[in-house]
Image: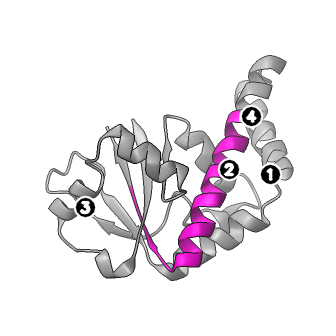
Amino acid sequence: MYFHLRAVPPGELRGDVPWFEGLFADDWDAVRERCAEHREVVLDKRYVSVDELYTGTRGRPGTGEFRDLPVLGAGQVIPREDERMPPFVVLGPELVARATEFLVGADFAELWRARLEDHTAWHGAPEPEAAAAWRDDLAQAHRELTEFYVRAAEAGDVVVKTLLI
């Protein structure tokens, strides 16, 4: 499973499901090129952990204001014809700007401390090496998402998201 986020100029956005499917049908070379240009982000199974980094886990007190953050959540849902497949989610420029503002202003060290506390409360403390690798992985995802959203916001782009299975 891969969670894809792709920046699209608003004038190119179409409302039909085949267009959205085609948007994510490129080969991996094209995807890697867009990722290098911060026009696309691909998160593997870590996307759940990244989402919890920003929103808190299991209703963590004090994080309710982040639940509707458009970084990985929120947006206009475009269902696929096959209901078993995850929908597409579209963020307009105003939600892209909101996500960007959050990411740029976020203190990664504080987010990481809260995420580790949540994990420890529910699952026990991870081994130090595992925690360090997990932290590094989340830090990289945070940098990639921040760079992606900053570029999308500067261009006035919409962001289209989907989970590819």
Q: Secondary structure at mark 4?
A: helix
Residue 58 appears in view: no
> Measured along the vertical axis of the image, is residue 152 above or below residue 110?
below
**Residue sitting nearer the eye, 59 or 164:** 164
- Callout 4 touching callout 2 (CB < 8 Å): no
> Measured along the vertical axis of the image, is residue 148 above or below residue 131?
below
Estimate how packed mark 3 is, as few (under 14), some (14 to 19) or many (20 or more) residues with alpha carbons within 10 Å: many
Q: Secondary structure at mark 2?
A: helix
Please give the residue where the numbered disc 2 appears in the rendered image.
142
Please give the residue where the numbered disc 4 appears in the rendered image.
136
> Measured along the vertical axis of the image, is residue 93 above or below residue 49?
below
Q: Which mark is residue 108?
A: 1
Residue 164 x/y as whole percent: 33, 43
Please give the residue where the numbered disc 3 appears in the rendered image.
20
Residue at 64% from the left image edge and 59% from the top image edge: 147
Horizontally, residue 51 falls left or right of residue 135, namely left
Magenta residues (range): 137-161
Give the quarter of the figure containing the N terminus.
top left
**Residue sitting nearer the eye, 42 or 80:** 42
- Callout 1 touching callout 2 (CB < 8 Å): yes
Disc 4 versus disc 3: distance between alpha carbons? 32 Å
- Upstream in the sequence, badge 4 or badge 3? 3
Estimate how packed mark 2 is, as few (under 14), some (14 to 19) or many (20 or more) residues with alpha carbons within 10 Å: some
Estimate how packed mark 1 is, as few (under 14), some (14 to 19) or many (20 or more) residues with alpha carbons within 10 Å: some
Residue at 75% from the left image edge and 56% from the top image edge: 61
Q: Amino acid at mark 4?
A: Asp
Q: Amino acid at mark 1?
A: Phe
Q: Amino acid at mark 3?
A: Phe
Q: Secondary structure at mark 1?
A: helix
